[in-house]
């Protein structure tokens, strides 16, 4: 049975599938990329200059690499009696979104999961071996990135955001959107744009940068609460979950 590990931009979760004799037959591991820098700072962002950050915008940091190295080591310990210590393509298949930070996260994770042993050691000074990470262009990826064109899904999305539920959210938070638009210098009018801003402010907080006074009045409490429905809308509008699940492995 092939063990499948997926690298994509979602929260980490491990599923164990058991057979008739209560035996573990397969493991699917889905994890998010590690620590990254902001993807696209807002126009009035005091930290939008690249000199404030250790790597380019939207890239995996050294902290993110270590996070996945440690996660890979944890997976090795957790499944040491299930997954062989030596690599074989018959045992594992890794799929990542076609994004630098997720590909690098997968590679760092595999470095922890498969440190070279015995005949796998190809350079005594390098405790690492290359393990294949498969991917596909985002516009062709229906399984992991979920960005392959789908007219039916696009229609459902449009219908979703026209529901009273989401219209009510926009109405209630009109003042918040206007407030954020005024101070950020960019139009904040949707939950998606709010989510991007929230993530930027969160990362700047993690890096101990002082947020502007206007930001501390709404972050994290108010901005975070408003963004929750964006993550839960499949429960609100039946039908989208079928499409968001992606293609089977």
Image (cartoon, helix red, strand yellow):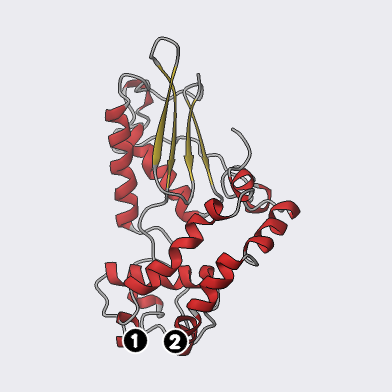
Image location of residue 228, percent across then percent down: 44, 62
75 versus 185 height, above or below = above
Q: How many marks?
A: 2
188 versus 88 height, above or below = below
Q: Residue at x 34, y 29 (%)?
A: 116
| Secondary structure of residue under mark 1 | helix
- State the residue in front, 242 or 206: 242
Q: Are marks 1 and 2 in contact (CB under 8 Å)?
A: yes
Q: Which quadrant holds the C terminus?
A: top right
76 versus 231 height, above or below = above
Q: Is residue 108 visible?
A: yes
Which residue in the protein does label 1 denote?
214
Q: Residue furthest bottom?
A: 182
Quadrant location of residue 58? bottom left
Q: Residue at x 68, y 51 (%)?
A: 148
Q: Residue furthest left?
A: 208
128 versus 80 height, above or below = below
| 33 sits left or right of 135 in the view | left
| 168 sits left or right of 208 in the view | right
Image location of residue 6, percent across then percent down: 49, 39
Image location of residue 74, percent across then percent down: 28, 35
Which residue in the protein does label 2 denote?
179
- State the residue in front, 153 or 35: 153
Q: Residue at x 55, y 78 (%)?
A: 189
Question: Label 2 neighbourhood size at 10 Å, few (<14), some (14-19), many (20+)?
Answer: some
Image location of residue 194, percent across then percent down: 47, 72
| 224 sits left or right of 153 in the view | left
| Secondary structure of residue under mark 2 | helix
Q: Earlier in the sequence, mark 1 or mark 2?
A: 2
Q: Is residue 199 visible?
A: no
Q: Residue furthest right?
A: 151
In whole angstroms, how far apart are the C-alphas of marks 1 and 2? 9 Å
């Amino acid at each position: 049975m092939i063990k499948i590990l997926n690298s994509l931009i979602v929260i980490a979760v491990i599923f164990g599938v058991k057979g008739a004799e209560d035996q573990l037959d397969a493991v699917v591991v889905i994890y998010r990329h590690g620590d990254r820098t902001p993807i696209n700072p807002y126009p009035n962002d005091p930290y939008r200059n690249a000199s404030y950050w250790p790597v380019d915008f939207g890239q995996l940091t050294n902290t993110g690499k270590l996070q996945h190295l440690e996660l890979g080591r944890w997976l090795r310990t957790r499944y040491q009696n299930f997954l062989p210590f030596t690599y074989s393509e018959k045992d594992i298949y890794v799929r990542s979104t076609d994004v630098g930070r997720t590909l690098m996260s997968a590679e760092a994770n595999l470095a922890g999961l498969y440190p070279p042993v015995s005949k796998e050691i190809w350079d005594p000074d390098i405790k690492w071996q290359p393990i294949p990470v498969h991917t596909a262009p985002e516009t062709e990826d229906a399984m992991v990135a979920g960005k392959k064109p789908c007219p039916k899904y696009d229609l459902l999305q449009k219908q979703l955001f026209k529901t009273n539920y989401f219209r009510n959210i926009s109405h209630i938070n009109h003042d918040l959107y206007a407030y954020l638009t005024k101070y950020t210098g960019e139009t904040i009018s949707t939950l998606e744009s709010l989510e991007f801003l929230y993530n930027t402010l969160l990362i700047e907080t993690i890096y101990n940068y002082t947020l502007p006074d206007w930001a501390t009045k709404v972050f994290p409490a108010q901005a975070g609460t408003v963004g929750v429905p964006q993550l839960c809308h499949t429960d609100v509008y039946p039908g989208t979950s079928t499409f968001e699940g992606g293609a089977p492995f």
